[in-house]
Image (spheres, helix red, strand yellow):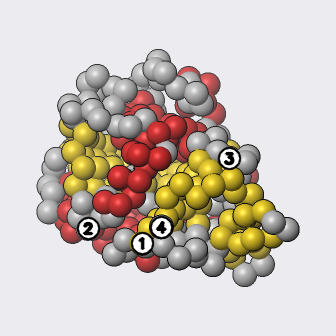
């Protein structure tokens, strides 16, 4: 293992992971054991065994997913769009090195191809070996792991995917370009005529500016934009958002009738029912429509407007 990073600290004879979430807040986890720690060409990767959250993936000192609640995030990222698209056959996961999203997608027999474009091969190998509660030791033959730049990969694809899931870390380091308008435009081109995309869009409490920026990018590109949420204890504030952009489909075409722990028909119906403060983003005079739905209309001047 590499030299201990600064985020791992000895406090009163116990080992703690101290995550610097923001200037005014730190989140600390008491750690049982360091199972894996190594630097790749992109970031520092650790798998830690914690007391309350179980095993966790930590990138550059920031917790990405845990054994305790990783299923919530991955089920919400995967099953919501797959329930909305009536016949998903080709799915792309951008990021997703912990394999959790791909694991959920693989539960659908109608899906014939699952491409996982993860730039850091070390993340995938570490999670498959040490974080099986999330990765499930994924070995489905439909899953293709591609270790390359997700931005460039998407740019090279046209009219290929039914569903794209952007499972990236925070907008910094190797993930920063996955939050840019040009990337979402390339995703639009990579989707089939009735395709849709979903991405995690940060905390609506602590990263509200990032979330609103993502929503506005989607509104400018997709005929339909919807925001939904979930409670995920690992993440700051425990309240997390997801933003969906769709070319055609808006509502669930079928129920989730699979081996899930969090998502079911009731969750599918309720996750789009947002509280008032999320229906009125900053600098927007009118409230969002129910469920965060936006449809672009053609004005008399021929310009797209909301």
Q: Quadrant of residue 29?
A: bottom right
Classify 24 as above or below 267: below
Location of mark 4 (residue) = 1
Between tags 4 and 2, which lies in front?
4
The percent coordinates of residue 237 (x first, y second) are 73, 58
Between tags 2 and 3, which lies in front?
3
Question: Secondary structure beneath disc 2?
Answer: loop
Question: Secondary structure beneath disc 1?
Answer: strand
Classify 172 as above or below 96: below
- Residue occupying the point 43% across, 77% down: 173
Which of marks 1 and 2 precedes in the sequence?
1
- Residue occupying the point 58% across, 76% down: 5
Tags 3 and 1 in contact by the CB under 8 Å rule?
A: no
Between tags 2 and 1, which lies in front?
1
In this rendering, position of residue 120 left or right of residue 275? left
Name the disc covering residue 149, or none.
2
Location of mark 1 (residue) = 39
Which of marks 4 and 1 precedes in the sequence?
4
Question: Secondary structure beneath disc 4?
Answer: loop
Location of mark 3 (residue) = 53
Which of marks 4 and 3 precedes in the sequence?
4
């Amino acid at each position: 293992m590499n030299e201990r990073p600064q985020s791992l600290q000895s406090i009163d004879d116990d080992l703690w992971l101290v995550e610097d979430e923001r200037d005014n807040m730190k989140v600390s986890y008491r750690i049982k054991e360091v199972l894996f720690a190594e630097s790749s060409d992109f970031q520092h990767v650790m798998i830690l065994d914690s007391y309350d959250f179980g095993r966790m993936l930590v990138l550059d000192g920031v917790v990405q997913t845990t054994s305790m609640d990783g299923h919530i995030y991955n089920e919400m990222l995967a099953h919501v769009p797959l329930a909305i698209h009536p016949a998903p056959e080709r799915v792309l996961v951008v990021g997703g090195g912990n394999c959790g999203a791909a694991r959920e997608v693989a539960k659908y027999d109608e899906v014939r191809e699952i491409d996982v474009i993860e730039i850091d091969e070390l993340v995938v190998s570490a999670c498959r070996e040490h974080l099986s509660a999330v990765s499930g030791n994924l070995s489905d033959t439909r899953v293709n792991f591609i270790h390359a730049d997700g931005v460039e990969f998407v740019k090279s694809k046209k009219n290929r995917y039914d569903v794209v899931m952007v499972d990236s870390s925070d907008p910094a380091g190797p993930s920063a370009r996955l939050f840019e308008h040009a990337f979402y435009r390339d995703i639009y081109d990579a989707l089939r005529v009735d395709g849709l995309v979903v991405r995690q869009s940060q905390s609506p409490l602590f990263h509200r500016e990032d979330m609103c920026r993502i929503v506005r990018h989607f509104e400018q590109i997709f005929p339909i934009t919807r925001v939904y949420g979930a409670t995920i204890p690992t993440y700051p504030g425990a309240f997390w958002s997801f933003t969906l952009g769709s070319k055609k489909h808006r509502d669930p075409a079928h129920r989730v009738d699979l081996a899930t722990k969090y998502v079911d028909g009731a969750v599918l119906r309720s996750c789009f029912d947002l509280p008032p403060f999320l229906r009125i983003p900053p600098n927007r005079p009118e409230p969002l429509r129910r469920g965060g739905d936006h449809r672009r209309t053609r004005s008399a001047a021929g310009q797209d407007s909301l």
